[in-house]
Image (spheres, rainbow, N blue to C red):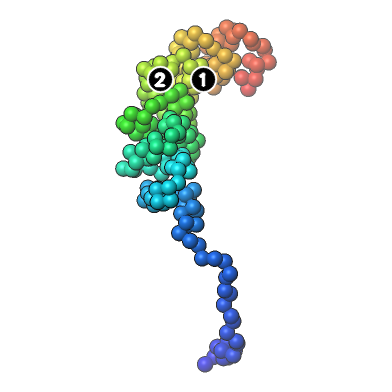
Amino acid sequence: MSQSLLSLSSLPVPETHKSNSPKPTSETLVNHLLYTFKSPFELKQIHAHIIKTNTSPSVLPLSLVASVCAFTPRFPYATKLIQISGKPENVVWNSCLKDFAESDRPIDAIRLFCRLCEYGVCLDAFTFSFLLKACTKISDGFDGRIVHGFIEKLGFQSNLFLQNSMVHLYAVCGETDDARQLFDKMSQRDIVTWNIMITQLVKKGKVDDAYEVFDKMPERNVRSWTYRRT
């Protein structure tokens, strides 16, 4: 036997540390899982506990419910939970769309939109603002046109924020002619509208067109034009 092993064998056995912390109960574990569940299975466990304890379903973090079930066969289950919570469906799903649009996978916002349409979930102007943001982030002009069609069909085409977002999307995707056509048709424009159109035309090298738009701008100055050219 080696000298090192003989030395170790002569050492006293240390006492184990005994924690005085109480053993977690099933209720403690469920309460922890309430804000950390990552699958429909865990969600169902929480829901069962809520029913058993006669707790209001409003305690469920509905945005998490939506995102966890968004691309699973449990999507209808999520919509049912949202409905019985009493919170407007579109508010919950819009929150989920916003998170997807701002994530590193904005395409998920578009995928979720398809599911919302499939299940007839009510949509509003905020829904389309997040979709346009997602399309712009990945320069997706194809799906952007589809979203534009929905905006027109559902009567949101007069929403100035959505109009500005569509002009920006088309321009970012290199479709400056479509962006300009939409810009010219707008009955109302704000400073954001003008700035988007001028800036994107300059970026695409269409300086003469940009100056033409700038010349029609109600409130303009040389400094703002110089800024956009640099």
In this view of the protein, which residue sits in the foreground, 188 or 198?
188
Amino acid tagged 1 = Phe
Q: Residue furthest front?
A: 54
Residue 208 percent coordinates (x, y)? 55, 11
Q: How many angstroms separate mark 2 from mark 1 (CA)?
A: 12 Å
In this view of the protein, which residue sits in the foreground, 12 or 88?
88
Residue 130 percent coordinates (x, y)? 47, 29
58 lies above or below 192: below
Task: Judge the density around disc 1: few (<14), some (14-19), many (≥20) Cα neighbours within 10 Å.
Answer: some
Residue 138 percent coordinates (x, y)? 45, 32
Residue 136 percent coordinates (x, y)? 47, 28
Q: Earlier in the sequence, mark 2 or mark 1?
A: 2
Amino acid tagged 2 = Ile
Q: Residue at x 44, y 31 (%)?
A: 88
Instruction: Find out whether the residues at labels 2 and 1 contact each other: C-beta distance under 8 Å.
Output: no
189 lies above or below 117: above
Quadrant in the picture for residue 26: bottom left
The answer to whether any part of residue 83 appears in the image is yes
The answer to whether any part of residue 134 appears in the image is no
Left or right: where 106 falls relative to 217: left
28 lies above or below 166: below
Residue, disc 1: 161
Q: Residue furthest right?
A: 223
Q: Secondary structure at mark 1?
A: helix
Q: Residue furthest bottom?
A: 1
Quadrant in the picture for the C terminus:
top right
Residue, disc 2: 151
Q: Secondary structure at mark 2?
A: helix
